[in-house]
């Protein structure tokens, strides 16, 4: 009997240890640098925590804001994109996060959806509501964050003073254009070129600014405009883009000297564009890091699941 109890305890600790390991290894947030999350249902807002500076940003999208949905779905109301993704491929959070990333020109690292969330997120003092949302997510809900991510985010955010939480209502910033919907009601569309000032002022990634690596962006496809799309996101978070051009290589990859492979900038670019390390061949380019956007990235933007 004693041996059986010892075996049960060992098995329990092995299973618990494995779960802890998985939570660490699949963690989305490094606990040190900026992370951007989109909360969906019932209202859409982006929560951004910049832990080194002990500040947070909450960016609210008004209802009836139409965004261009990736994978070729066209324009949808932002609040309907999550459900669209669930119907299509059970990946609503991913579809919403990636579509907002392209529309706003900022990285969206994660998503969180809580059904029947009744706690109001106040636009005057959103802190209590967001902390409540994190607590609920620890019990359940749809998210790509691990329990470890959620616990750390809750813990770090609760330490931030209310006056360090910047609230941005997109409707009041001038980055939205009014549009008339088929039923005669008013809606909004995001004007991409106008989001840059807001992003660069309050959503910059301080670590990327500090590393200050020069970046070249090359379009590895026959589709025009891909390098410009990538450059917009990188510039908005503080990256230094020094060159844009074309190349025949059709695969999404990042190149640079070996010493930059483990830099925060390269790791962040890999996460944003889902590219792999492509070696040290820089060709005739003088940038320290080269980002090649290929057919796989183009398909992610335009091909339906």
Image (tube, rainbow, N blue to C red):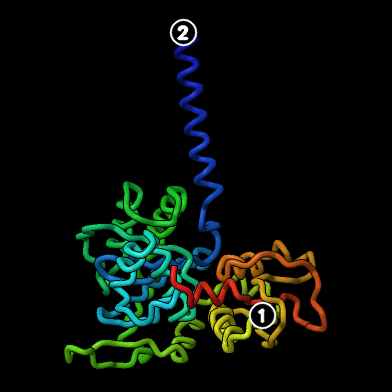
Can you identify the residue that label 1 sits on? 220
Name the residue at 32% across, 53% down. Answer: 141
Question: Closest to the observer: 58 or 158?
Answer: 58
Q: Residue at x 30, y 52 (%)?
A: 136
Please identify, in this view, whether the residue under mark 2 or under mark 1 is nearer the observer: 1
Is 44 positioned to the left or the right of 35 in the image?
Answer: left
What residue occupies the far top of the structure in this picture?
Answer: 1
Viewport quadrant of the N terminus: top left
Q: Where does the image place residue 216, in percent across and percent down from the top left?
A: 69, 82
Q: How far is the residue under mark 2 from the one under mark 1?
A: 65 Å
Vertical placement of 183 versus 261: above or below? below
Q: Earlier in the sequence, mark 2 or mark 1?
A: 2
Q: Quarter holding the C terminus?
A: bottom left
10 Å neighbourhood of mark 2: few (<14), some, or many (≥20)?
A: few
**Residue to which mark 2 is pinned:** 2
Q: Residues within 10 Å of mark 1 (few under 14, many from 20)?
A: many
> In the rendered image, which quarter is residue 213 located in?
bottom right
Query: Visible in this render: residue 290?
Result: yes
* Front residue of this view, candidates 28 and 254: 254
Q: Position of residue 8 (x, y in %)?
A: 45, 19
The answer to whether mark 2 and mark 1 are in CB contact below 8 A is: no
Q: Nearer the viewer, residue 127 or 191?
A: 191
Counting the numbered discs, the total is 2
Q: Position of residue 124 (x, y in %)?
A: 26, 74
- Determine if residue 240 is in view: no
The residue sitting at 65% across, 84% down in the picture is 241
Where residue 280 sits in the image (x, y, percent)? 80, 69
Q: Secondary structure at mark 1?
A: loop
Q: Secondary structure at mark 2?
A: helix
From the viewer's perspective, is 73 left or right of 274? Answer: left
* Residue at image coords 82%, 79%: 283
């Amino acid at each position: 009997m004693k041996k059986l109890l010892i075996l049960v305890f060992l098995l329990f600790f092995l299973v618990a240890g494995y779960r802890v390991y998985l939570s660490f290894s699949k963690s989305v947030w490094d606990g040190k640098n900026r992370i951007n999350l989109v909360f969906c249902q019932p209202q859409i807002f982006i929560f951004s925590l910049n832990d080194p500076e002990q500040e947070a940003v909450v960016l609210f999208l008004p209802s009836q804001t139409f965004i261009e949905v990736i994978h070729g779905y066209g324009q949808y109301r932002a609040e309907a994109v999550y459900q669209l993704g669930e119907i299509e491929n059970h990946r609503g959070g991913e579809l919403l996060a990636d579509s907002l990333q392209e529309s706003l020109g900022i990285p969206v690292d994660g998503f969180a959806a809580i059904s029947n969330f009744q706690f109001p997120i106040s636009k005057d003092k959103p802190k209590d509501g967001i902390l409540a949302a994190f607590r609920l997510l620890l019990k359940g809900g749809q998210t790509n964050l691990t329990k470890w991510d959620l616990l750390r985010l809750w813990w770090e955010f609760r330490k931030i003073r209310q006056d360090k939480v910047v609230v941005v209502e997109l409707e009041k910033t001038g980055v939205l254009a009014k549009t008339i919907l088929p039923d005669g009601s008013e809606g909004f569309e995001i004007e991409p070129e106008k989001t840059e000032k807001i992003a660069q002022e309050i959503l910059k990634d301080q670590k990327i600014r500090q590393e200050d690596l020069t970046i070249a962006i090359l379009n590895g496809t026959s589709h025009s405009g891909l390098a410009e799309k990538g450059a917009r996101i990188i510039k908005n978070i503080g990256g230094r883009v020094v060159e844009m051009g074309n190349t025949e290589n059709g695969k999404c990859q990042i190149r640079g000297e070996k010493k930059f492979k483990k830099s925060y900038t390269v790791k962040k670019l890999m996460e944003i564009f889902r590219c792999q390390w492509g070696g040290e061949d820089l060709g005739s380019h003088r940038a320290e890091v080269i980002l090649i956007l290929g057919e796989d990235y183009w398909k992610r933007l335009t091909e339906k699941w």
